[in-house]
Amino acid sequence: MIIYNVTIKIQLEIYSSWLEWLKKVHIPEILATGCFTKTTILKLLEVDDTEGPTYAIQYFAETMEAYEVYIDQFAVVMRQRSFDKWGNKFIAFRSLMQVVN
């Protein structure tokens, strides 16, 4: 199992609208690609939230090949949709992990 993790710090002024959009629009669009089987949304604790909360969204792929299809065919468009909607009101970084247990 491969986990594609996207950690995002959201500006306080948009976080509730962003979270609703994430759940109702963005994640369903990503799952519709067929590259991931499920997602988990996590809110980071014990971090400075004065400028806004930080979330980690984990997308689970059965294989590395499924993840690579997402990156090659869908990632650029999905990232652009986020920027088109929210501009520079968030900062994101991505990491790739493999489940070993």
Image (spheres, rainbow, N blue to C red):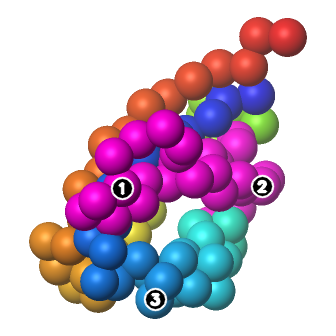
Q: Which residue is mark 2?
A: 38
Q: Is residue 25 above or below residue 26?
A: below
Tag nearer the camera, 1 or 3: 1
Q: Which residue is mark 1?
A: 49
Residue 52 coordinates in the image, percent (x, y): 33, 64
Q: Amino acid at mark 3?
A: Ser
Q: Earlier in the sequence, mark 1 or mark 3?
A: 3
Looking at the image, residue 64 sits to the left or right of residue 51; the answer is right
Query: In the depicted view, which residue is nearer to us: 68 or 90?
Result: 90
Whole-angstrom CA distance, mark 2 to mark 1, is 27 Å
Identify the residue shown where x is 42% and y is 54%. 54
Q: Which residue is mark 3?
A: 17
Q: Which residues are magenta?
A: 33-61
Whether residue 81 appears in this view of the structure is: no
Q: Is residue 63 above or below residue 75?
A: above
Q: Earlier in the sequence, mark 2 or mark 1?
A: 2
Q: Quadrant of the C terminus?
A: top right
Label 1 CA crowd tier, 10 Å (few <14, some 14–19, many 20+): some
Q: Amino acid at mark 2?
A: Lys
Whole-angstrom CA distance, mark 3 to mark 2, is 22 Å
Q: The residue tagged with tag 2: helix, strand or loop?
A: strand
